[in-house]
Amino acid sequence: MIIGRNMKLVYKVEIMGLTYNPVPYKRTTQRGKFSKEYKKYIIWKTLLCDLFCSQNPHSPKTLYEIGKVMHARPNLSGAYFVEVVAIYKSDNHGDTDNIAKGVNDALFKNDKLVSGSYTYKYDKKGGLRVRIYEARAGEAIDFIKEQDRIR
């Protein structure tokens, strides 16, 4: 994908070789926090945050403890364009737009100014590739309009 001229790649994270598919965003209520699906989503979100922070050591983050294990949560905020590639190992998977929503939920403290694109592919193992570009607010809209004009 061609990124807008003024957008600069600032972060990336890759999770490869999974024995399962990426986990989609799971909306919940207080009662829903005890469901198997929500607990699976929280484990996925924690893994994504930890790997993002380890692969991007200079990113802003908050450290916290679960039990006796330290974890890191990114504190990204501002205007970003996020490219998500979900890699599925089987046909039994969540919607790719919900995978992208889960990525934004995990990585951004406030995703109000976040836009992006998402796609998928199939492979022998599951995985996820995320590229995050710094952008001015509204720049992604200019980029999409530019692409429509070219087509």
Image (cartoon, rainbow, N blue to C red):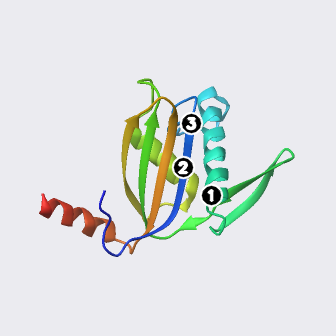
Evaluate if marks 1 and 3 touch, with contact meaning CB atoms under 8 Å apart: no
Secondary structure, mark 1, is helix
Q: Mark number for residue 86? A: none
Residue 61 x/y as whole percent: 67, 64
Q: Mark number for residue 14? A: 2
Amino acid on which the number 1 mark rests in the picture: Gln
Residue 97 x/y as whole percent: 39, 43
- Along the line of sight, which residue is nearer the eye, 138 or 34? 138
Amino acid on which the number 2 mark rests in the picture: Glu
Q: Is residue 19 above or below residue 56?
A: above
Q: Residue at x 61, y 40 (%)?
A: 44
- Along the line of sight, which residue is nearer the eye, 68 or 55? 55
Q: Residues within 10 Å of mark 1 (few under 14, many from 20)?
A: some
How many labels sit on residues? 3
Which of disc 3 and disc 1 is earlier in sequence?
3
Q: Residues within 10 Å of mark 2 (few under 14, many from 20)?
A: some
Secondary structure, mark 2, is strand
Which residue bears the numbered disc 3? 17
Which residue bears the numbered disc 1? 55
Evaluate if marks 1 and 2 touch, with contact meaning CB atoms under 8 Å apart: yes
User: Residue reaching furthest right?
Assistant: 68
